[in-house]
Image (tube, grey):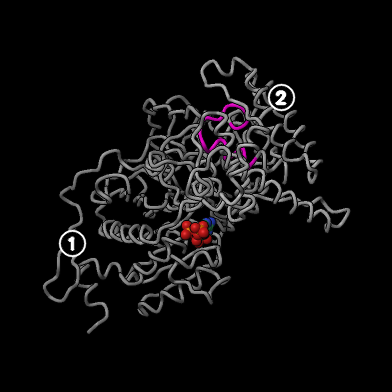
């Protein structure tokens, strides 16, 4: 029996299209391993896999194409090797490289019928989105976070692209929220990890990425106070190892600093004022608690228990640092300790300190287990979620391959609504999107001669009808506008423009035409011809008047903006995401509020009476 009998039966007329197609998969991690297996077993004729990484021990629990003996080998190559065995008729090309490398240019993308993203970061996703829009190749974008995931079909001119919706920028916490007015457990955890731990054992908080030290007239005074406080804490660090050290640290951060804060009455008009702690009282109460409580990581410790763990872990960490100092070479930078969620001493210290601070501000205390997840920025990657999302990617790919985009869907996998899989029709491109709301074309330049003047005066104005009001920019910034003509005589190559660079042209006249993105092809052109040639004239429609935009809601706690960006597909969360409750995960995952009712064109699985194959009827 032919190995592809059932696939042929299932796919019907799509079988030969798929067999002859060349597709690209970017990322061979959690989703990528599952997806590559699906693509190979479905019989996609040629599959290119790009991944920049090598295999790590921690990948093996879910990236099933990899085994222990593959650790440190390139993911793309091993994925190819393992998946080829499933179907020798499929050609797999592996690229151990960054997808942003220049060899993966617009022409290269145009060689694919379809691109799949199986990435874990927004930057690479945005890059592939941009390239697929420029090359006009459909993209299936996917991501998972714990039990949630999503698949998005992106096709230039037909659907929203990845950048049609502004992505949430990684959230930082204003330093005043962390240091003066915490209101959530995460604020106290960040304080314990990035301020207290760092000031005592590590590098200064000034280098902590989670803290936003932006000053404005409202907070300048408070920031100056906080700097003084930090300097005073650093001085206490000098007495590490002394009998008095725990009391000095404790009284500085849990008594004196809190009393100072409490004395700023304006701060507490709308909030509950903090209550300072008393070292003597707590050390007395903690006598019976004993540091062994630190082993109980699933229960929420009492204040006295937190004190006991604080004092004990402070001692453990101080002893460690003192030992390191004793053996350190003089002349080198002094040794430091860094927070690691898997290092019990550092986690105990952060958990106990965070909880005591929470108590002071009337915030719920958390178990050490919870704090570990939040401080370590972890959402566990779930193999089943990845497998389901990879399956949904292929089902959506069938619709794209059938050129049936009307039936393609944005699919959500969610843990928190009645239906685990929900779908929404594709939304049309957002007018004014900086990526897909622009016209694209190629421009051939002779790098030895082409100048910016040749582009502006020789092509853009005469051939494309631009008036005086236009601006030209590269990815590095503005190159030309009516007030900036210094670069006109420069060669494009001197301006950093080379093969596969993009140039953006913006029409600044009244009632402007859409922006134009030119991708550069370098070619030596005959001396007697122009140094820049447009092989095709793009259609330049009018720029749509943007509909009134809904201002994204500002997060009342942090002042940062949250706009429900699609799942970033990251297993390890940034610090902004720690403390996400289901509600926030749902927002981030863009999961619809209400499950979307089953629709006529939902996929129906039918049992096959002829031998167990599944016929997919959509
Ligand atoms: N710019 C890029 N070019 C090529 N591959 C990339 C790029 N950025 C990310 N990737 C790859 O995308 C894959 C994403 O997979 P996944 O989300 O499972 O992450 P992981 O690194 O394998 O695991 P984890 O981060 O969860 O430990 C990774 O293998 C990563 O190397
Ligand atoms: Zn867009």
CA neighbours of label 1 inside 10 A, class few (<14), some (14 to 19), many (20+): few
Q: Quadrant of the C terminus?
A: bottom left
Relative to 400, is 187 above or below?
above
**Any atom of ligand 1 within 8 Å of the CB at mark 1?**
no
Question: Residue 158 — which label?
Answer: none
Q: x, y percentage for residue 246? A: 72, 40
What is the secondary structure assignment of the residue under circle 1?
strand
Left/right placement of residue 7 relative to residue 527 reads: left
Instruction: Give the x, y percent position of residue 435.
Output: 45, 42
Q: Which residue is mark 1?
A: 605
Task: Write down the residue under mark 2.
Answer: 225
Quarter of the figure with residue 562: top left
Q: Nearer the viewer, residue 32 or 221?
A: 221
Task: Judge whether 10 appears above or below 618 on screen.
Answer: below
Residue at 41% over, 39% down = 584
Please report the residue visible at 57 percent of the width from the left and 36 percent of the height from the top.
188
In whole angstroms, how far apart are the C-alphas of marks 1 and 2? 65 Å
**For the view shown, which residue lies furthest in the right direction?**
331
Q: Earlier in the sequence, mark 1 or mark 2?
A: 2
Residue sticking out furthest to the left: 609
The residue range painted magenta reads: 178-194
On the question of residue 11 being in view, the answer is yes
């Amino acid at each position: 029996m032919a190995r592809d009998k059932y696939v042929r039966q299932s796919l019907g007329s799509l079988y030969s299209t798929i067999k002859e197609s060349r597709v690209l998969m970017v990322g061979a991690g959690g989703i990528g391993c599952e997806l590559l297996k699906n693509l190979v077993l479905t019989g996609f004729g040629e599959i290119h896999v790009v991944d920049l990484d090598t295999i790590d021990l921690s990948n093996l629990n879910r990236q099933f194409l990899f085994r222990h003996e593959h650790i440190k080998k390139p993911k793309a190559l091993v994925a190819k090797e393992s998946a080829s065995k499933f179907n020798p008729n499929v050609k797999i090309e592996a690229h151990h490289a960054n997808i942003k490398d220049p060899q993966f240019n617009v022409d290269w993308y145009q060689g694919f019928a379809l691109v799949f993203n199986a990435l874990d970061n927004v930057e690479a996703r945005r890059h592939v989105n941009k390239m697929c829009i420029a090359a006009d190749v459909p993209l299936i974008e996917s991501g998972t976070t714990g039990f949630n995931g999503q698949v998005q079909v992106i096709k230039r001119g037909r659907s929203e692209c990845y950048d049609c919706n502004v992505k949430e920028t990684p959230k930082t916490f204003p330093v005043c929220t962390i240091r003066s007015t915490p209101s959530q457990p995460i604020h106290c955890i960040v304080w314990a990890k990035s301020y207290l731990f760092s000031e005592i054992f590590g590098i200064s908080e000034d280098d902590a990425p989670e803290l936003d030290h932006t000053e404005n007239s409202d907070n300048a005074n408070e920031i100056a106070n906080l700097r003084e406080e930090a300097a005073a804490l650093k001085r206490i660090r000098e007495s590490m190892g002394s009998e008095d050290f725990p009391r000095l640290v404790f009284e500085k951060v849990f008594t004196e600093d809190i009393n100072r804060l409490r004395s700023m009455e304006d701060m507490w008009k709308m909030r509950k004022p903090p209550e300072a702690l008393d070292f003597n009282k707590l050390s007395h109460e903690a006598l019976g608690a004993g540091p062994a409580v630190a082993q109980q990581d699933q229960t929420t410790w009492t204040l006295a228990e937190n004190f006991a763990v604080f004092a004990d872990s402070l001692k453990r960490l101080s002893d460690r640092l003192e030992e390191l100092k004793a053996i350190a070479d003089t002349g080198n930078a002094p040794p430091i300790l860094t927070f690691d969620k898997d290092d019990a001493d550092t986690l105990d210290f952060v958990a106990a300190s965070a909880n005591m601070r929470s108590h002071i501000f009337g915030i719920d205390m958390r178990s050490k287990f919870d704090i570990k997840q939040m401080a370590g920025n972890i959402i566990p990657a779930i193999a089943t979620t990845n497998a389901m999302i990879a399956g949904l990617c292929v089902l959506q790919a069938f619709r794209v391959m059938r050129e049936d985009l009307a039936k393609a869907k944005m699919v959500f996998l969610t843990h928190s609504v009645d239906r685990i899989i929900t779908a929404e029709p594709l939304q049309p491109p957002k007018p004014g999107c900086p990526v897909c709301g622009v016209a694209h074309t190629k421009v051939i330049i002779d790098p030895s001669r082409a100048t910016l003047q040749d582009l502006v005066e020789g092509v853009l104005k005469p051939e494309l009808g631009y008036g005086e009001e236009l601006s030209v920019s590269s990815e590095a910034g503005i190159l030309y506008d009516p007030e900036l003509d210094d670069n006109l005589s420069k060669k494009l190559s001197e301006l950093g423009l080379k093969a596969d660079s993009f140039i953006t042209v913006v029409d600044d006249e009244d009632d402007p035409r859409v922006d134009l993105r030119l991708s550069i092809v370098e070619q030596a052109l005959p001396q007697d011809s122009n140094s820049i040639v447009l092989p095709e004239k793009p259609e330049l429609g009018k720029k749509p008047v943007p509909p009134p935009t809904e201002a994204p809601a500002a997060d009342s706690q942090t002042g940062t903006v949250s706009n429900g960006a699609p799942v970033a597909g990251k297993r390890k969360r940034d610090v902004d995401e720690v403390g996400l409750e289901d509600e926030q995960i749902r927002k981030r995952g863009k999961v619809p509020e209400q499950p979307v009712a089953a629709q006529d064109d939902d996929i129906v699985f039918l049992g096959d009476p002829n031998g167990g194959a599944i016929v997919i009827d959509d």
